[in-house]
Amino acid sequence: MLKAEIDRVVGRSSAKLLKASIPPVRRWLLEFVMQKDREDLSVQKAIAESELYPPRVKLLETLREDGTWPIPASRKVAEDAGPGPPYGWTSVTVLRNLYMLYEYCATMDTGHIDAAVERILGWQDDAGYIRGPERDTFPRVYHNGLALGIVVKYGRESDPRTRALVEWLLKTQRRDGGWNIPYLQDVKYLPEYRHMRVSDFVRLVNQGGVPPYDPERYYDVPSCVWSTVGALRGLAWIKPQARNPDVKRACGYVLDNFFKRNYHGNFNRSERSWTTLKFPTYFGSGLTALDSLVYLGMGPDDERMERPMRWLLGARAADGFWYRSERPHPIDDQWVTVTALMILKYFSDMR
């Protein structure tokens, strides 16, 4: 019954979106929802038009040879006052713009994209994670999940640095299947630090005023569901990870906590984060979670998937589209809609 409902919705909404979509949205719709072959003339036309899409052209024109983009003056002042990239807005800009360029059908050979990907990998710590942008130096799993997805999308899956990043992610997975932010989401709960301001706590950690970090001491503290969603965001792009039992355990952790309030107050605590449709999809939401879960093989054979999938179906408006909010966002709403359709199509085809 769910499959029939999904197939009906996908068919009707796809037909409507096809008539109104911008070129890159139309390309994703044609190729990954309507399953047109890359040699299909309509797909080729959408890709060709995407190459001339003004936001894509602007991003490529402003991408410098060193793999970075200019940042606002106020952001640059703040960045220069600190340790410099990757701590600051430069690294955020590089990741977000590369994400969008991929959506706009760019490849590693386009412009200076390969230099930008190399810039990301150049920010790798000896431990394997990608540093930045936070100045507290604690590695963020969701930031690294985004970085991993980007370098893989642009053809760097076999790069030893990419493999080191994957190894770091899997090594830092916690016993309950999820991830958290070191220190801020475990040590900070100890009585002696609980009431400290975050800035004072970070300073104390960086000064060596906190005992050596042993994550096994804090396995009684639940993982952060949004850090876990972020990790899966990158791992979902590496096909063999869909068979990794540890990754499946992480998927289970997300499904067991779907629609629930996040335990940690410093990262998307409200349960409303699940049902707020967001684009770009690197922002944590139920849409982001489902996008990763289905590509990691979580399908109809897992009964925990039914409620989130029914929510996604129910979030569709009467006109056949999905919307960020009651306020119109004409372009973002197209992206949200095509993302929802890709999730539904992939899920339905797993039956």
Image (cartoon, rainbow, N blue to C red):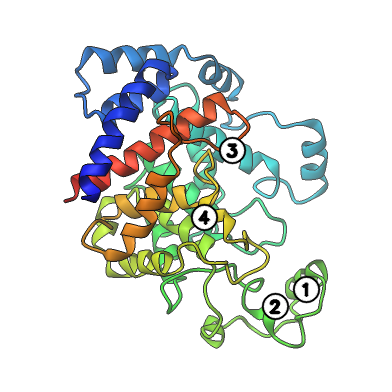
Question: Label for residue 325?
Answer: 3
Separation of disc 3 and disc 4 at Cα? 14 Å
The local crowd at label 3, few if under 14, some if 14 to 19, many if 20 or more residues have their Cα within 10 Å, is few
Separation of disc 3 and disc 2 at Cα? 35 Å
Q: Earlier in the sequence, mark 3 or mark 2?
A: 2
The local crowd at label 4, few if under 14, some if 14 to 19, many if 20 or more residues have their Cα within 10 Å, is many
**Residue 230 percent coordinates (x, y):** 49, 56
Describe the element under mark 4 as helix, strand or loop.
helix
Question: Which three-letter amino acid code belongs to the residue tagged 2?
Answer: Lys
**Labels 3 & 4 near each other (Cβ < 8 A):** no
Question: Label for residue 188?
Answer: 2
Q: Is residue 40 above or below residue 9?
A: above
Answer with the quarter of the image where residue 171 lies. Answer: bottom left
Describe the element under mark 3 as helix, strand or loop.
loop
Q: Earlier in the sequence, mark 3 or mark 1?
A: 1
Residue 310 appears left or right of 203: left
Question: Label for residue 274?
Answer: 4
Question: Which three-letter amino acid code belongs to the residue tagged 4?
Answer: Trp
Q: Earlier in the sequence, mark 1 or mark 4?
A: 1
